[in-house]
Amino acid sequence: MEYNYIIVEEKNNCIGLITLNRPKAYNALSIPLIREVCDAIKSFEEDEKIAAIVLTGGSKVFAAGADIKELSSLDFASAYNSEFITKDWKALEKHKKPIIAAVSGFALGGGCELSLLCDITICDTSAKFGQPEVKIGTMPGIGGTQRLTRAVGKSKAMMMCLTGDMIDANEARDYGLVAKISDEGEVIDDAIDIALKIASMSQPVVKLIKESINNAYESSLQVGLESERKSFYATFSLEDKTEGMNAFLEKRKANFKNK
């Protein structure tokens, strides 16, 4: 498929790289752009050789929010009946392979929410995160009051959503919003390095770990522990478990077959 609003590449034959590409609009998340991202992720999900995905806006800006021109034309009935943006967003929630957000510059509104939807977020020193919807008379609608609260806690989420103030890279790391801060200009390469490290592991185990962590994020402790135990036991049926433990005992690098 040819894309108009994103650039799609493969790196090292095992990493999918998606770059948002509406530079004049600061990568505003229009419906066509979101649909292209969904399509690209689906294609990478179906490609057996792709082990992880990196999502970025490039070196200047991640995404400065939703497309205000689209928002301004909506009323309650049209937004609700069409499931504006959320219908397409749901497709992004179902990905099984790890997705790493590589953030430079602004990640505001829908851009911040898009980074929250990813499994790992790293940023460089230029990054600014925020939920400024309150400043234009609306509120976050694709995870900003939910995933953000789970990521940073009630008080910080309230501060960000009720004031619309931005936080910088250091604050985002202190809040637990990002896992790592890269030097400016290096965040995409660093994200690819993390993705390559993940790609070197047993992919069935990677998916089980991701599933288990998401269970912890979305369920009670006891439900999560039970799910974790079952997944842990399931790894003992894998050839990769035997290879990994033999490699450790023999002091060599494991050669996983992903089965």
Image: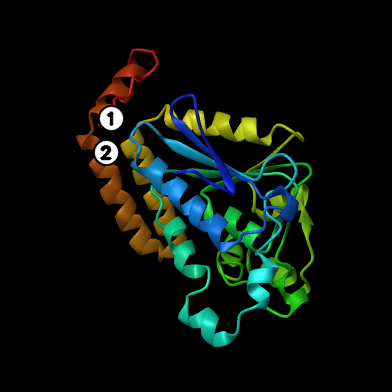
Q: Is residue 32 left or right of residue 66?
A: left
When the figure is inspected, residue 199 is found, relative to residue 126, above or below; the finding is above
Residue 127 drawn at (x, y percent): 75, 48
Q: Residues within 10 Å of mark 2 (few under 14, many from 20)?
A: some
Query: Which residue is label 1 attached to?
Result: 241
Mark 2 / mark 1, whichever is N-terminal: 2
Which disc, if any, is residue 235?
A: 2
Q: Amino acid at mark 1?
A: Lys
Q: Secondary structure at mark 2?
A: helix
Q: Residues within 10 Å of mark 1 (few under 14, many from 20)?
A: some
Where's the N terminus, which quadrant? top left
Task: Please name the residue shown 53% across and 87% down the image.
Answer: 77
- Is there CB contact under 8 Å for labels 2 and 1? yes
Residue 68 drawn at (x, y percent): 69, 69
- Residue 97 placement: quadrant: top left
* Residue lying furthest left: 237
Question: In the depicted view, which residue is nearer to us: 38 or 209?
Answer: 38
- Residue 187 placement: quadrant: top right
When the figure is inspected, residue 73 is found, relative to residue 42, above or below; the finding is below
- Residue 69 placement: quadrant: bottom right
Question: In the depicted view, which residue is nearer to us: 239 or 14?
Answer: 14
Residue 168 drawn at (x, y percent): 78, 52
When the figure is inspected, residue 246 is found, relative to residue 175, above or below; the finding is above
Q: Amino acid at mark 2?
A: Thr
Q: Is residue 107 visible?
A: yes
Task: Please name the residue shown 67% across and 50% down the image.
Answer: 22
